[in-house]
Image: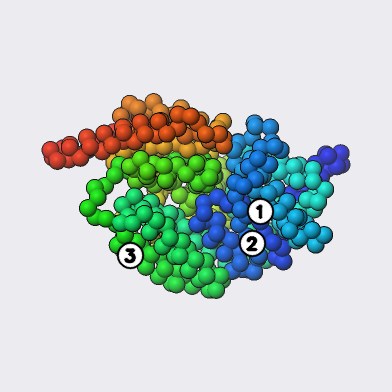
Amino acid sequence: MTVAAKQNFGRFYDKVKQFDVTGKTLLIPDMAPFASRLLASCFHAVGVNALVMETYKGLSLGKEFTSGKECFPCQVTLGDILHFLKGEKERLGENFSPERYVYFLPEADGPCRFGMYNKMQRLVLDRFEEFRDVPITYVSTRNSYSTVDIMPAEAATIFRKLCYVTIIIADILDRIVWRVRPYELRPGLTDSFVQKALEALLEEVELRGASLEFNGLFDIVEDTAATARTFIDTRQPRRPLIGIVGEIYVRTHPDSNQNIVRVLEQFGAEVTVASIGEWINYISYDMARDQKRQVKLALLKRDFTSLRGALNALIPTQIEKYYQIARQKQVYKHALKHLDIEKDHAISLLEKRMDKERLYSFDIGTEAALSIGAALEHLHEGYSGVVNVYPFTCMPSAICTAVLKPLLNKMRMPYIDAPYDGAIQPNREVALRTFLHQAKQRLESRNSGNRNGKAAKCHIKP
């Protein structure tokens, strides 16, 4: 890079970078409520002070300092950090020290605008003299969210293993709630109980997480599933099962999606949302795909130096893939002993499904690969409808719409797009009610077919 370029873009290198955050207060934007808080507890376990910022209270600030061309998660997270820092400045007065804080905003490689938001938000923070010295750090999909550059190497190894297990646990807590809450004997019982389970998990992670002894966490998961099962009113019939796919932030952030899960439950659905663990597994899977491609290319060229390097990169990625698969099965097993929650899809299965139907290629990447694949699995698993939740103007989700809407309509699978930009759509309730009515009709039709001894099968022709 030239000297002039460094002068023009120096702030992106000086104040948006990876560095050891030990001794700082790491500010984490809220996303999935369970996962965000367990992530903060994992940081605490390895000696990093982290807190999840209050969310959605600063949305007006986020909109004030954006043009509207950014996708909605950028406005929400920008509003969160500005709201927090302004509150801290007001609370502490002259004692406010921006160097105490580090804003944690991960990034992604590829065409999604998300990869540039930490740079864009750096420009906004620099407009406030009192916030110019608040650095931004990140982890990236480029190296599968490695934390080795933001904490000591030994802590990074512990954190990575602990964090993956707690993310899967967070997914399971969500799925326990979604399985039980629509049928609970008393309104509010499930939410209050699982919140107490979360508090027990947070305490366990902070006390013993660094030892990587997971039995205590597994016991809490198992007890939570076993107890939650007793909350179900077994006299109620199963509702139509709705799968939510789409962009990871908006689909998991209740405020951003205007609590779509609760709204669908209110209208008579049982809902499952694509998990965060699925995304983490996909990142490792996609990295291994690329490394395998490098191995094949080196073999074709007979370039043994490059081959050695490609194999050295591939082997640890493959080991991590198998670790993730084994840990995920292990954690789910504890919950599935007691409660029939929905399991995650294997990433390899999603790719095979799309390759078979010739609908989309993993070579294109983005969240579209997961959303299209998961929607197809929902179709074959007997779900009654699919909702595509995403930020308005999201490119990967627009691809999903283009592929899924005609396909699922052809298969008579209820499907609806749910884009969000903070505004309340006047026809939202009517649209969701209509969608649920169609989903109930599909469920009734399938149940009628099964009673008549007919197998409810479906196949997509390429």
Q: Are marks 1 and 2 in contact (CB under 8 Å)?
A: yes
Label 3, label 2: how far apart the Cα atoms are? 31 Å
Q: Nearer the viewer, residue 112 or 384?
A: 384
- Does residue 195 appear left or right of residue 423 in this picture? left
SS for tag 3? helix
Q: Residue furthest left?
A: 452
Please name the residue that numbered disc 2 is placed on: 50
**Crowd tier of the residue under label 1, counting other residues whose Cα lies within 10 Å: few below 14, some 14–19, many 20 or above:** many
Q: Residue, x 27% and y 55% (percent of image)?
A: 233
Q: Is residue 69 above or below residue 289?
A: above
Q: Tag 2 or tag 1, which sits nearer the N-term?
A: 2
Residue 104 tag number = 1
Instruction: Please say whether residue 343 is visible from this viewpoint.
Output: no
Pick whichever, 193 or 246, lies toward us.
Answer: 193
Q: Front-most of 313 and 248?
A: 248
Type of amino acid at the residue the image marks with label 2: Ala
**Mark 1 or mark 3: which comes first in sequence?**
1
N-terminal-most mark, 3 or 2 = 2
The residue wearing badge 3 is 226
